[in-house]
Amino acid sequence: MARSQNSFIKKQLEQKRLKKKKDKEERKQERKENSSGGNLEDMIMYVDENGNFSSTPPEKKKEEK
């Protein structure tokens, strides 16, 4: 009887492991679908000559000699 009990427990553990793996994959997919995205252009900040942050690049000025 111990032998059949052993195999039953092994099957239960295997099912738990597979269910946990499946749930983790579903959560990963859900996070991927709902993410706002990490676009590089959205993350770049520029600093002007006064030290203020802006999301637009500064205007290029001609260098005076």
Image (tube, rainbow, N blue to C red):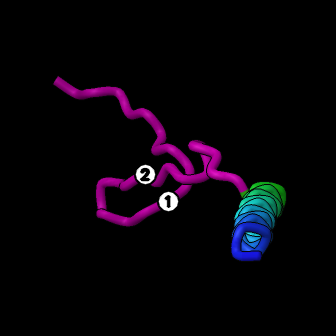
Residue type, mark 1 in image: Ser
Q: Secondary structure at mark 2?
A: strand
Instruction: Report whether 53 appears left or right of 24.
Output: left
Q: Position of residue 7 (x, y in %)?
A: 75, 65
How far separated are the C-alphas under marks 2 and 1?
5 Å
Q: Is residue 27 visible?
A: no
Q: Residues within 10 Å of mark 1 (few under 14, many from 20)?
A: few
Q: Secondary structure at mark 1?
A: strand
Residue, x 48% and y 40% (percent of image)? Answer: 59
Q: Nearer the viewer, residue 35 or 64?
A: 35
If the image is split into quadrants, where does the N terminus sit?
Answer: bottom right
Q: Which residue is mark 1?
A: 54
Q: Position of residue 60 (x, y in %)?
A: 43, 33
Q: In the picture shown, does residue 39 fall above or below 51?
A: above
Give the quarter of the image for residue 4.
Answer: bottom right
The answer to whether the residues at label 2 and label 1 have Cβ atoms under 8 Å apart is: yes
Q: Position of residue 41 (x, y in %)?
A: 60, 43
Q: Which residue is mark 2?
A: 46
Specify the label residue 34 is tagged with: none
Give the quarter of the image for residue 29.
Answer: bottom right
Residue, x 30% and y 63% (percent of image)? Answer: 51
Q: Position of residue 32 (x, y in %)?
A: 76, 55
Give the quarter of the image for residue 34.
Answer: bottom right
Residue, x 83% and y 57% (percent of image)? Answer: 33
* Residue numbers of the magenta segment: 37-65
Q: Nearer the viewer, residue 8 or 26?
A: 8
Residue type, mark 2 in image: Tyr
